[in-house]
Image: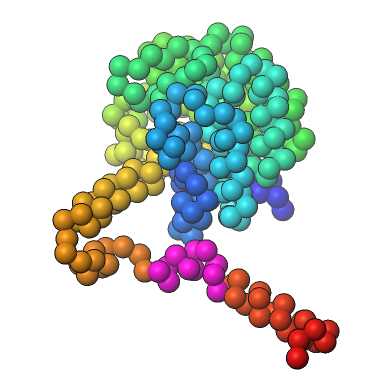
Amino acid sequence: MSQTNILRKKLNSGNLVKVGGAFDAMSAKIVETHGFDAIWAGSFAISATRALPDASIMTMTEFLNVATSMVDACSIPVIADCDTGFGGPSNVSYTVKKYENAGVAAISIEDKVFPKQNSLLEGGTQVLLSEKEFVAKIIAAKEAKKNPNFTIIARTEALIANLGMNEAIKRAKAYEKAGADAILIHSKQNTPNEIFEFVDTWNGNIPIVIVPTSYPNVKLNDLKKHDISMVIYANQTLRASYTAMNQILEQIKNSESLEKINGQISSMEDIFKLQKMYDLKNEEEMIKTNLKKMGYVN
């Protein structure tokens, strides 16, 4: 079964789908080893690895290359954060074709104008496209996909832009009608209250996705009670990496040796296992054995 079909099956299972954020193939592989259902290839985290703002600066091809490396390294579904879809409906159509062909299981597109700013940026400018313009993007995405199970997640930023609950619900209904497979409702409040109000009010028939970055106190049982289908831990791996590297580098700079630091970092063996170095050695031995059988090696 393809990862596209696996993700759709998980979404329709009634169980909460847990998605871990990643920013490259290594972090994606680590997400997989910890038993998450899927990987989030987040634009914020990927931009940060280039030391660039999360402001639509990187190209679709650059983001696609990172997502493809995750697909190649992992055996669980990859969900790609495609911001505003890299342009108008034609750009969205092209994006869907490229990401689906790369083996990505789902993409998320949001209803902000290009270039967008990160939703949680203090003092940021959050401007939304008209409902009609974003519906056109969803229609283009739906028409472009080959596998009907390729998941188009429509992300509304109405609450982020302070447009109110009625606008968020109105847009979500329109996006579902246009063919979105799931709705991502985002909030910058420090409690999940408005998320729960949205979910309990809109009465839609497609899965709801949330990203609890700003309200980390939310409990999984509460998400299940409100029939939320997917939770994305979008940027915790990036932020943990940033903290750990800063702490270790500060200690290295101020230490006479690496003796104390070694206990705080992974072993070389851990990295070898992640890279499958021993699998490579076994493959080389197998090739040598076959060459010997064929008379090429004495």
Q: Position of residue 171 (x, y in %)?
A: 54, 15
**Would you say the magenta stretch is mainly helix, strand or loop?**
helix
Q: Identify the residue shown where x is 16% and y is 64%.
A: 256
In the image: residue 190, left or right of residue 225? left
Which contiguous range is marked in magenta? 268-278
Looking at the image, is 77 positioned above or below residue 132? Answer: below
How has the structure been colored for display?
rainbow
Q: Nearer the viewer, residue 187 or 56?
A: 56
In the image: residue 59, left or right of residue 159? right
Q: Was residue 63 drawn as part of the magenta stretch in this picture?
A: no
Pick the quarter of the image with the C terminus: bottom right
In the image: residue 194, left or right of residue 94? left
Q: Identify the residue shown where x is 17% and y is 60%.
A: 255
Residue 261, by quadrant, is bottom left
Q: Position of residue 8 (x, y in %)?
A: 64, 42
User: Does residue 278 appear anywhere in the picture?
Assistant: yes
Q: Identify the residue shown where x is 30% and y is 21%.
A: 122
User: Does residue 211 appear anywhere in the picture?
Assistant: no
Residue 269, by quadrant, is bottom left
Looking at the image, is 291 positioned above or below residue 69? Answer: below
Q: Position of residue 249 (x, y in %)?
A: 25, 53
Q: Identify the residue shown where x is 39% and y is 47%.
A: 237
Q: Nearer the viewer, residue 201 or 22?
A: 22
